[in-house]
Amino acid sequence: MTEPAAGGCCRCCCSFIFTLGLTSLFMWLSLRTNDPKCSVQKFYLPALNKTLNTAKNNTLIFMVRLDNSNKDKGVYYDDVNLTFYDSPNKSQPHLIGNYTIPRFYQGHQKKAKKDGHTAVNMTLVSRVVAPNGTAEFWVDLATAVRFKILWWKTKKHSLIRSGSVLVDETGAKGKKGIKLRSGAPERGNYCALVGVLVSLLVLLT
Ligand SMILES: *[C@@H]1O[C@H](CO)[C@@H](O)[C@H](O)[C@H]1NC(C)=O
Ligand SMILES: *[C@@H]1O[C@H](CO)[C@@H](O)[C@H](O)[C@H]1NC(C)=O
Ligand SMILES: *[C@@H]1O[C@H](CO)[C@@H](O)[C@H](O)[C@H]1NC(C)=O
Ligand SMILES: *[C@@H]1O[C@H](CO)[C@@H](O)[C@H](O)[C@H]1NC(C)=O
Ligand SMILES: *[C@@H]1O[C@H](CO)[C@@H](O)[C@H](O)[C@H]1NC(C)=O
Ligand SMILES: *[C@@H]1O[C@H](CO)[C@@H](O)[C@H](O)[C@H]1NC(C)=O
Ligand SMILES: *[C@@H]1O[C@H](CO)[C@@H](O)[C@H](O)[C@H]1NC(C)=O
């Protein structure tokens, strides 16, 4: 006698769970964020330009680019700390210079080009120049970001990127931008997706 009612309840329960699952999947899709992409676009040490005679010039001229690829989320950057080292060999790095890009806000799908120059330790720099005039350096970028999604802001999380920069005998790196990478594998988003899928499975069985 009660069977049809029970079947109806089960069906109703199933569709409720299904809707819940779809809703969480949809929410995950609209709330997930991509970290900004960071690259070094310019890196020039006039002192290492063989056609100039300015070996004492201790200026480093650089440009980094920060790209927000999110379709509809803005990014609040904390102060962006750039640190320059004399070698990609992390077992014995020497700091040659640093620079801070002041905090700023970036709208969705915007690219920010940040120019700067800083004084570097020429004693250390000249030590790593190979006989053929090339030299390799290491750049660390450290900041914290929070995303703006509609009217609210996400929690701050740190953004650490780095990469090695090779300069030739003109004291400049090649034309191509150098992507700065995260040392750790990027996993935040995948964890969230796996979480949602696991809870969906648990709910459906
Ligand atoms: C070093 O070189 C740059 C670029 O050529 C120049 O703008 C700067 O004034 C020079 N600095 C010194 C201390 O000579
Ligand atoms: C890094 O530096 C250490 C200490 O100077 C040295 O023993 C090691 O061979 C270097 N590694 C590379 C890859 O150059
Ligand atoms: C560079 O590093 C020095 C020593 O750690 C620090 O005192 C200085 O504030 C830094 N400068 C910038 C521009 O970050
Ligand atoms: C440059 O680095 C050397 C070696 O670490 C250090 O002895 C020297 O004091 C530094 N010079 C400046 C101006 O910081
Ligand atoms: C210059 O010398 C460095 C180190 O000896 C080497 O790795 C590099 O391939 C050389 N580059 C050219 C263009 O010869
Ligand atoms: C950047 O440098 C400043 C001053 O040295 C420091 O207070 C801040 O924590 C640094 N930010 C990051 C993300 O490392
Ligand atoms: C190196 O110096 C030469 C001579 O002044 C100049 O033409 C050239 O643009 C410089 N190289 C770079 C990468 O700026």
Image: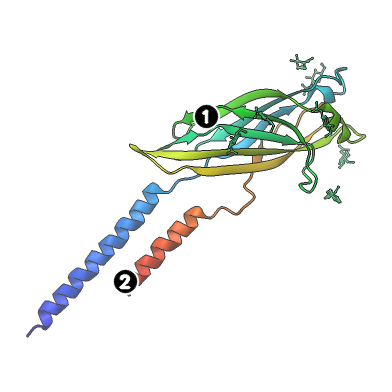
The earlier-in-sequence mark between 1 and 2 is: 1
Residue drawn at (35%, 71%) of the image: 202
Which quarter of the rendering shows the N terminus?
bottom left
Residue that carries the numbered disc 2 in the rendered image: 204
Residue 2 drawn above or below residue 43 = below
Q: Label 2 neighbourhood size at 10 Å, few (<14), some (14-19), many (20+)?
A: few
Residue drawn at (60%, 39%) of the image: 142
Q: CA distance from mark 1 to mark 2?
A: 46 Å
Q: Which mark is residue 103?
A: 1
Residue 81 drawn above or below residue 190 = above
Image depth: mark 1 or mark 2 in front:
1
Image coordinates for residue 43, horizontal then vertical, percent: 72, 29
Residue drawn at (85%, 18%) of the image: 54
Q: Secondary structure at mark 2?
A: helix
Image coordinates for residue 83, horizontal then vertical, percent: 68, 35
- The answer to whether residue 38 is left or right of residue 44 is left
Q: Which mark is residue 185?
A: none
Residue drawn at (37%, 66%) of the image: 199
Image coordinates for residue 94, horizontal then vertical, percent: 78, 38
Work out whether residue 120 or residue 65 is closer to the camera in this orientation and state it: 120
Residue 63: image quadrant is top right
Whether residue 71 is visible to the viewer of this picture, yes or no, is no
Image coordinates for residue 84, horizontal then vertical, percent: 72, 34
Residue 10 drawn above or below residue 50 = below
Q: Amino acid at mark 2?
A: Leu
Whether residue 54 is visible to the viewer of this picture, yes or no, is yes
